[in-house]
Image: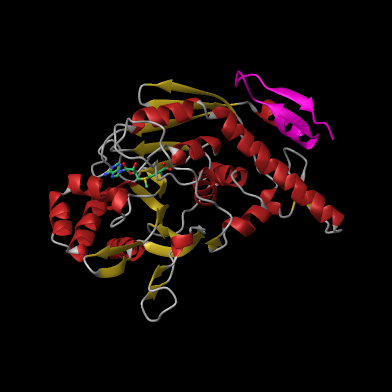
């Protein structure tokens, strides 16, 4: 089995390389309008934005920045299959322009766009990222009425083009194999995510104009891909940055395509992918280990689990989880602007999982095609 991952270093405002109605899922995070770190990029895309900021017309600048993003949303709408889902991570911006402090509601602007084109809006996720900076409170301190509520959350907007996707015959089998665990469902489908921390975003390279990557955590992309697509699907990220979505697609046995306008990220993404196989495999090991711990806990509390995974023989809560299939990565090969991800065969995947069950240390390095198993010391 293999998946294919393509990166195009150009603007997603014209994605002629992507066919109409060919994408199963979009997972992305755009540059945030009215957050200062993105001003320069927006101004390059439309110089009128810089002029509006200079004359302190924040509202106009905000409008124009969203008009820039709308070009990519237009393209997304074109390439999405009917029934496909889009997940957009976005934060609102707070900013003082001249002597006026205000919130620029990016999430509502983007939602309005998708309502206008006819998408169905699904319940969203609030990603709460507590900051413990001493200066997180803004405004007039303890004196009313001009203190401001702290902004410690971002949104993950979720939209669907058209009706629910349907699965027939072979596709049904793939859907069953793409199931997640019951206990994962309980966390992943909660409307507030408090367990995902932001990541260190400092870029240790001078290839790009930015000092920070603005990357989201791997777990965020991984969850969304596993919640809203099935194996073999095509996942698109039109604002790829450091390639997090692409890596999460590799770990999830989905194909992917990413667009990034900043050429400086070529090296960042390439380096990241070159060193990622072990990280992605360890991530899957961890997911299974956590499930085994959950089963142990249920057993300890005498909560009988009725069902068993057909392939791996561990217990699961529901019938829907019995056909779960894991695909560990054997090798990632790079060719031009493409990465091909090859997965181990079923026998090897079963062998890996058996060793996890037997509490073995699994070492995917140094040569990713070779795996060593070693009994863990207790
Ligand atoms: C918030 S960052 C995405 C970070 C990414 N999720 C990650 O984990 O690394 C937004 C990215 O979109 C890129 N970008 C902005 N406008 C773009 C466009 N029109 N086409 C493609 N990429 C664009 C920026 O250069 C930036 O790297």
Q: Residue at x 16, y 49 (%)?
A: 46
Q: Quadrant of residue 104?
A: bottom left
Q: Nearer the viewer, residue 164 or 66?
A: 66
Q: Residue at x 55, y 36 (%)?
A: 251
Name above or below for residue 141 compared with residue 53. below
Quadrant containing ligand 1: top left
Q: Position of residue 143 (x, y in %)?
A: 41, 79
Q: Position of residue 7 (x, y in %)?
A: 36, 32
Magenta region, residue range: 350-378
Q: Is residue 21 visible?
A: yes
Q: Position of residue 277 (x, y in %)?
A: 55, 28
Residue 362 is covered by the magenta coloring = yes
Q: Position of residue 68 (x, y in %)?
A: 22, 52
Name above or below for residue 63 compared with residue 269. below
Q: Residue at x 36, y 42 (%)?
A: 22
Q: Nearer the viewer, residue 23 or 66?
A: 66
How many numbered markers are drawn? 0
Name above or below for residue 255 compared with residue 198. above
| Residue 275 left/right relative to 238 | right
| Residue 83 left/right relative to 224 | left
Which quadrant is the N terminus positioned in?
Answer: top right
| Residue 346 left/right relative to 13 | right
Q: Quadrant of residue 334?
A: top left
Residue 16 is covered by the magenta coloring = no
How has the structure been colored for display?
Answer: secondary structure
Which quadrant is the C terminus positioned in?
Answer: top right
Q: Is residue 351 visible?
A: no
Q: Residue at x 34, y 50 (%)?
A: 30
């Amino acid at each position: 089995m293999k998946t294919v991952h393509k990166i195009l270093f150009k603007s997603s405002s014209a994605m002629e390389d992507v066919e109409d109605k060919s994408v199963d899922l979009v997972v992305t995070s755009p540059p945030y309008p009215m957050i200062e770190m993105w001003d320069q990029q927006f101004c390059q895309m439309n110089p009128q934005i810089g002029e509006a900021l200079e004359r302190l017309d924040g509202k106009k600048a905000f409008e124009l920045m969203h008009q820039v993003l709308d070009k990519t949303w237009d393209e997304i709408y074109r390439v999405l299959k009917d029934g496909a889902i889009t997940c957009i991570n976005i934060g609102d911006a707070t900013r003082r322009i001249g002597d006026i402090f205000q919130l620029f509601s990016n999430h509502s602007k983007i939602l309005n766009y998708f309502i206008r084109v006819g998408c169905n809006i699904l319940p969203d996720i609030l990603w709460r990222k507590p900051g413990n900076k001493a200066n997180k409170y803004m405004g007039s301190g303890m004196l009313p009425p001009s203190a401001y509520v702290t902004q410690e959350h971002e949104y993950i907007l979720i939209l669907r083009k058209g009706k629910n996707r349907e699965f027939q015959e072979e596709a049904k089998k793939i859907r069953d194999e793409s199931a997640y665990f019951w206990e994962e469902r309980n966390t992943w489908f909660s409307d507030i995510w408090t367990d995902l921390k932001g990541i260190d975003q400092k870029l240790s390279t001078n290839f790009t104009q930015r000092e920070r990557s603005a990357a989201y955590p791997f777990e965020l992309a991984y969850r969304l891909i596993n919640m809203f697509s099935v194996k073999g699907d095509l996942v698109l990220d039109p604002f790829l940055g450091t390639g997090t979505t692409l890596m999460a697609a590799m770990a999830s046995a989905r194909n992917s395509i990413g667009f990034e306008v900043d050429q400086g990220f070529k090296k960042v993404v390439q380096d990241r992918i070159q060193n990622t196989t072990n990280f992605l495999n360890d991530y899957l090991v961890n997911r299974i280990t956590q499930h085994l711990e959950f089963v142990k806990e249920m057993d300890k509390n005498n909560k009988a689990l009725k069902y068993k995974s057909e392939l791996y023989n561990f217990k699961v809560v529901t019938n829907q989880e019995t056909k779960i299939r894991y695909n560990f990565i054997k090798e990632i090969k790079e060719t031009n602007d493409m990465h091909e991800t090859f997965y181990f065969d079923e026998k090897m995947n079963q062998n890996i999982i058996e060793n996890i069950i037997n509490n073995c240390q699994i070492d995917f390095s140094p040569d990713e095609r070779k795996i060593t198993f070693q009994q863990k010391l207790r």
